[in-house]
Amino acid sequence: MPLLRHVAFALLLGALLVPAQASRACTSFRLKTTDGDVFYARTMEYAQDLGSKVAIIPKGTSFVGTLPDGTSKGLPFTAKYGFVGMNALGINNLSDGMNEKGLVVGGLLFPGYAGYEPYSPDTAGNTIAQFEMVNWLLSQCATVADVRRDIGKVRVCQGPTTLNGVTAGSLPLHFTVHDATGDSIVLEYMDGKVRIHDNPIGVLTNSPDFTWMLTFLSNTVNLSAVNVPALDLAGYVVRQTGQGSGMLGLPGDFTPPSRFVRMVALTQSALPVTGPDAGLALAMTIIGNVDIPKGAVREKDAAETMFDVTQWVAVADVARSRYYYHTDTDRNWHYVDVKQALAAAGSAIQTVPINVAPAYPDATATATPYK
């Protein structure tokens, strides 16, 4: 194997630590406008087609937690709040979403580090599977403070590895949580215990753990949005080749630590904006910097080559209660108005297909004479 391919493979293997069928390179961040509007953005990468749809889950919907043996005999709970977000594999256990109170939750892959609470039949009545965590948080909590207060009420255990007849693997997850004030935390289950991390920078990717990622930022303290000055070498002046020299060394690969640094650099250096339209545009612009085109990330085994691809991207506009999304085949942004959708749904879960043919408007007829 050529050296470049060998190094690239080693980096991907070390970052993902899971088979290609379960690989996912999710990225998320939260930002605020000058007037306090909160926006959240995330990507969903996966080699297997998830068949995601936007699920609209009304207040009053009943759930029962799934036990490790796959039976629905865990914690029964009823949604205090309605919520909207992305499902997968034909199951309305969301991987991402926002509720009617503006709480936003995302589940991101956490391979090699996730270790959920040990299961005991004595606590079955308080148990849910890790892939039900987004539903539980969105349905039960209105704020990050609620999450901190109530997280001890539920026992999160490793769920079954087959969902709706599809082998999904162990799905090791950690969770990013934001509320309408911009308060942010990360929930990580490690060594059988939950760890709650304040997240003032609002960014989360995958493995290693969040504390490690914060430490890793120390390697990039030289990065700056300000161009570096020319360097005088005893009469020979070395000048920048162009704009952006302050960000020389900003990692551009798709490993989780590199995506973490890239999102921190871009969210922190972007000029503050005012108003919901400007906030939305900024969130959409920044999240586009981690899109993975099909073929850029590959995993080979004896049977086939798997390709990670950004299947969908979501942006939550908390102030206007809108959940925006686009897919890898339709780059136009669509949105669901969360409160209107919940009101229209009544008591029935509804879904919105996202894999639709792209419609790019023809602007030819809008041409006018040059003046």
Image (cartoon, rainbow, N blue to C red):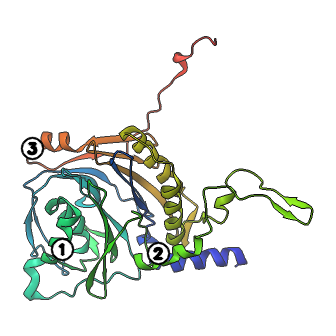
Q: Nearer the viewer, residue 170 or 227?
A: 227
Q: How far is disc 3 from disc 2 in space, using C-alphas?
A: 42 Å
Image-based side of 196 in relation to 201, left or right: left
Q: Residues within 10 Å of mark 3 (few under 14, many from 20)?
A: few
Look at label 1 and name its amino acid. Ile
Residue for badge 3: 346
| Above-or-below relation of 297 to 323 | below
Q: Secondary structure at mark 2?
A: helix
Residue 331 vs residue 186, the one in the foreground: 186
Q: Residue at x 70, y 50 (%)?
A: 243
For mark 2, what is the residue? 213
Q: Which amino acid does the dot numbered 2 rest on?
A: Met
In the figure, is residue 100 to the left or right of 317? left
Q: CA distance from mark 2 to mark 1?
A: 23 Å
Residue 92, horizontal then vertical, whole percent? 22, 59
The mark total stands at: 3
Disc 3 marks a residue whose amino acid type is Gly
Which mark sits nearer the N-terminus, 3 or 2?
A: 2
Are the residues tagged 1 and 3 within 8 Å (C-beta)? no
